Image (spheres, grey):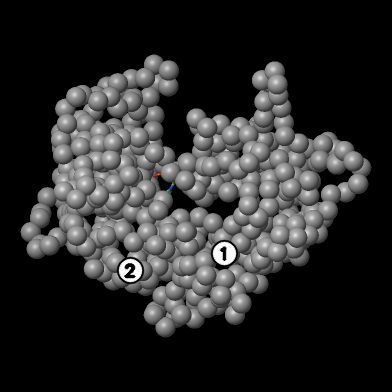
Amino acid sequence: MLKALDGAEVDILDRLPTPFGLVRSGVAPDHPETKLSHLPETWKQIVVNQFSRVAANERCSFFGNVNLGTTVSLSDLCKMYDAVVLAYGAESDRYLGVPGEDLGGIYSAREFVWWYNGHPDCSNVSPDLKNTDTAVVLGQGNVALDVARILLRPINELETTDIAEHALTSLRESTIRKVYLVGRRGPVQAACTAKELREILGIKDLHVCIQKADLLTSAADEEELKKGRIQRRVYELFSKAATSHQQHDIVGQRELHFMFFRKPDRFLPSESGNTVSGVRLEKTCLKENGASGKQVAVGTGQFEDLKCGLVLKSVGYKSVPVDGLPFDEYRGVVPNMKGRVLSLDQAEHAIVEKGLYVTGWLKRGPTGIIATNLYCAEETVASILEDFKNGLLTPSSGSPKPGRQGLLQVLENKNARFVPFSGWEKIDTKERMEGELRNKPRKKITTWEELLLAVDG
Ligand code: NAP
């Protein structure tokens, strides 16, 4: 917006006292710190630098610790600003809806990721990694690979990352040796991408198990492989791993099992009845779904139990609506036309919500990498510009909206404390200083209380 429209002022609101969203609390700490040949930085650092440059622009302000829906309402924001863009992603989880899902020892991958990345909402998650040797991860997307990799990677490779200290301590004491990555469909349909799969398969001294029978392909699979370059590369990697990872002779060696054609039927309780002791899986086969043209997993009525003491459900994230926001509960997205939020009038016709826009996972659903979100944001900005040029963002009252001054007034009236970018910089300095002592890029501050204390300096 800053580049596209001279004179535009942008305020960024975040419920956390820290900026950078997914880069700070979603992207895995060990991942992938590939250095670009012409730059001395990691790509994660490049994203952080880019965000920091935007925040330093004199036409931009950061308001951390401001929660949309409680500190300030959506309708207030729409009254204050010519355009409001919702970019708050997907902060909840898809539910499997099978018996036993609320047992102890079962976490969504998001909770686990937030825990190891030091998100202040999950510092107390504390998964027990000491009373079992087996973890089951449900789902075979890139997030599933991330959490499995963190459980399996040699600890010395995590010690120099910015992983949260509490997670490092827990992983150091972990007794988990076997991780099962369970997919309801086959290796041709696995949702992960090749680079991420190659990375987990390349973990030092890891024994990888893939049933060769699962690699047999049907005519429909062959069709899918013909059409999908990424799928083809993923399938090739599975095939190669199934034949080349046979040796299993190191004592205490860690194991990664890819289980295909299995869907969770129920979670089994331990004797106490409180924690999980296993997952009952139903074997599946694939059937073509006429409507979507995709192959879907169908239960065969054959079951098997897989013992474990930890389950991570990695079956997708879910966005949550705020008061007054049109929301498609089924798809978990905000209905929109190129980023313009749509609602239904009384006759059920779609109408554009003037001045309200959406981008990212809240707009498209929880899929795509950082670059996908970049294109998505460009589309939304183009819509805002078009509407602005067509006079659609001019307030009907004729008098300009208060913008930043209006927000500051609301925050003052509510006695709400916001964290400016300079407040984050204090957190950043403290984290880096403490990290340096431990030979890490930073030691993340992981509780709300300590984050706000660090802002006070
Ligand atoms: P995802 O790619 O959509 O994968 C979800 C997985 O859950 C799939 O294997 C899916 O199987 C399975 N699943 C869904 N519902 C299920 C059910 N009811 N029962 C059993 N299995 C079920 O989602 P994600 O892994 O959360 O990743 C989100 C996005 O972030 C993706 O676009 C991903 O590529 C991206 N990401 C990228 C990176 C990276 O680039 N390094 C890292 C992390 C995440 P079906 O295919 O059968 O539905």
The one nearer the camera, 231 or 165, is 165
Q: Residue furthest bottom?
A: 437
Amino acid identity at mark 1 = Thr
Residue 92 place in picture, x, y as percent: 47, 46
Looking at the image, is 301 positioned above or below residue 58? above
Q: Residue at x 34, y 61 (%)?
A: 126
Looking at the image, is 152 positioned above or below residue 313? below
Residue 375 place in picture, x, y as percent: 59, 44
Residue 431 place in picture, x, y as percent: 50, 75
Q: Residue at x 64, y 58 (%)?
A: 66
* Residue 250 visible in the shown view: yes
Q: Residue 117 is drawn in which quadrant? A: bottom left
Q: CA distance from mark 1 to mark 2?
A: 21 Å
Amino acid identity at mark 2 = Leu
Quadrant (top left, top right, bottom left, bottom right) of the C terminus: bottom right
Q: Which residue is mark 2?
A: 168
Residue 17 place in picture, x, y as percent: 58, 64
Say left or right for 77 vs 454: right
Determine whether the residue tagged by mark 1 lies in a helix, strand or loop: loop
Quadrant hosting ligand 1 = top left
Q: Residue 205 is drawn in which quadrant? A: bottom left
Q: Count numbered badges in the picture.
A: 2
Q: Residue furthest front?
A: 272
Q: Which residue is mark 1?
A: 18
* Residue 43 visible in the shown view: no
N-terminal label among 1 and 2: 1
Q: Residue 124 is drawn in which quadrant? A: bottom left
Q: Residue at x 68, y 48 (%)?
A: 73
Say left or right for 177 vs 398: left
Q: Residue furthest top?
A: 290
Which numbered dot is residue 152? none
